[in-house]
Structure formats: structure tokens, C-alpha cells
Amino acid sequence: MPDEPPVDPFAVPLADERTQLTAFLEHYRSAVEATLDGLDAEQVRRRLVPSATTLLGLLAHVTWMQRVWFEECIGGTPRTALGLVTTPDESFQLHDGDTAASVLEAHRAACATARAALAEHGLDDVVTGHRAGPRTVRWVLLQVLRELAHHCGHADVLREQVLAQDRTT
């Protein structure tokens, strides 16, 4: 499945649980990436809220989040060994060289690594890389879906604000 196009989650309502979860996961991964479509470098970095949350920062964060859950929690490699920042707040911070293309590429690489990690496990497998204790792979998938859906909502609102600002200026 890693090289197949994402499945529409509404097209698989009677499929097995793994197929359904994977379809929603791929749907939200694509949705968060799509919030950058057609925007320039300034727009994707524009800060519209007091925090460091920007459209590009959100994509950087969900990339980090997926690496934490799939590479650390499921894969068992500590985030420090992965070269990841240690806190969620830090994951929103962008570097000068970060571009929409580079952050999209990092996100897609993280998704490919996550797909490979998932392919090795069943939903009921217990993984022990989480700092708070063991989790099932199902639990990890549900947590990642929760976070992706949450951040897709943020990204939709930020994109709407960016476009509205640019229409009025």
C-alpha cells in the first residue's frame, strides 16, 4: 500500500478496521498538505495568532508528531537519537531555510517511514517506545488521527484568514 494513492475514507465504510483507519490517516495527511496549495513563501509563514503557529509551522509540527509516534513509540528510537526537538512547541519553529517544498518533502518522508513501520505490526501489537508506557498500535493510530484532524482544522482556519487578508489589501 505505500505506493498506492490514498483511499477515500468514505469509500471504505464496510472495510476492515485497518483499511478504514489507514484511509482516514491518508486523507488527513493529504488535507494538511493541501492547505499550502497555491500560497507563496510569505503566506505559508504568516503569523496570525500570538503563538508560532503558521501554515508551514503546522506542517512541520505534524511531521514531527508522526515521527514521534511512528519512529519513537512504534519503532523504539528515542526522539533525541532521531534528531528531533523534544517538545511539541519547539516543533512549530521554522528555520530560515525551511520552504514549503522542503517541509512537504520532510512530511512525505515521515509518512513513508510511518507506513513502513505500520506494515510490520498488527493493530493489537503492543509497542513500548512511548515515554508514558506501552500502547497498542491501534491506540497510536487513533492518537495520530486525532492530532491530524485537530491540526487540519487549525490549518483550514489559518488558510482562510490568509486568503481573506490578501483579498482586502
Image (spheres, rainbow, N blue to C red):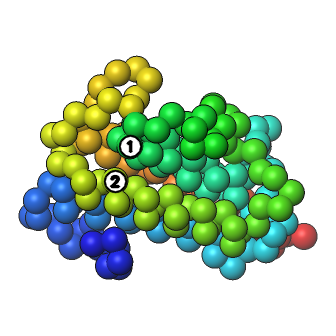
Q: Which quadrant is home to the C terminus?
A: bottom right
Q: Is residue 123 left or right of residue 73?
A: left
Q: What element does badge 2 sit on?
A: helix
Q: Disc 1 vs disc 2: Cβ atoms closer than 8 Å?
A: yes
Q: Callout 1: 10 Å neighbours few (<14), some, many (20+)? A: some
Amino acid found under the numbered disc labelled 1: Gly
Q: Position of residue 142 (x, y in %)?
A: 31, 43
Residue located at (46% from left, 38% from top): 77
Examine the image and state in which quarter residue 19 appears.
bottom left
Q: Position of residue 5 (x, y in %)?
A: 35, 79
Residue located at (77% from left, 51% from top): 94
Q: What element does badge 1 sit on?
A: loop
Q: Position of residue 52 (x, y in %)?
A: 76, 42
Which of the two discs, 1 and 2, labels the residue nearer the N terminus? 1
- Residue 75 bears which disc, if any? 1
In the rendered image, which residue does mark 2 sit on?
117
Residue located at (39% from left, 32% from top): 129
Q: Callout 2: 10 Å neighbours few (<14), some, many (20+)? A: some
Residue 162 visible from this viewpoint: no
Say if 57 sits above or below 159 in the image.
above
- Give how far apart the Cα atoms at labels 1 and 2 are: 7 Å
Amino acid found under the numbered disc labelled 2: Ala
Residue 49 visible from this viewpoint: yes
- Residue 129 bears which disc, if any? none
Q: Is residue 30 left or right of residue 22?
A: right
Examine the image and state in which quarter residue 20 appears.
bottom left
Residue located at (43% from left, 64% from top): 112
Q: Position of residue 65 (x, y in %)?
A: 52, 44
- The one nearer the camera, 45 or 76, is 76
Say if 130 sits above or below 46 in the image.
above
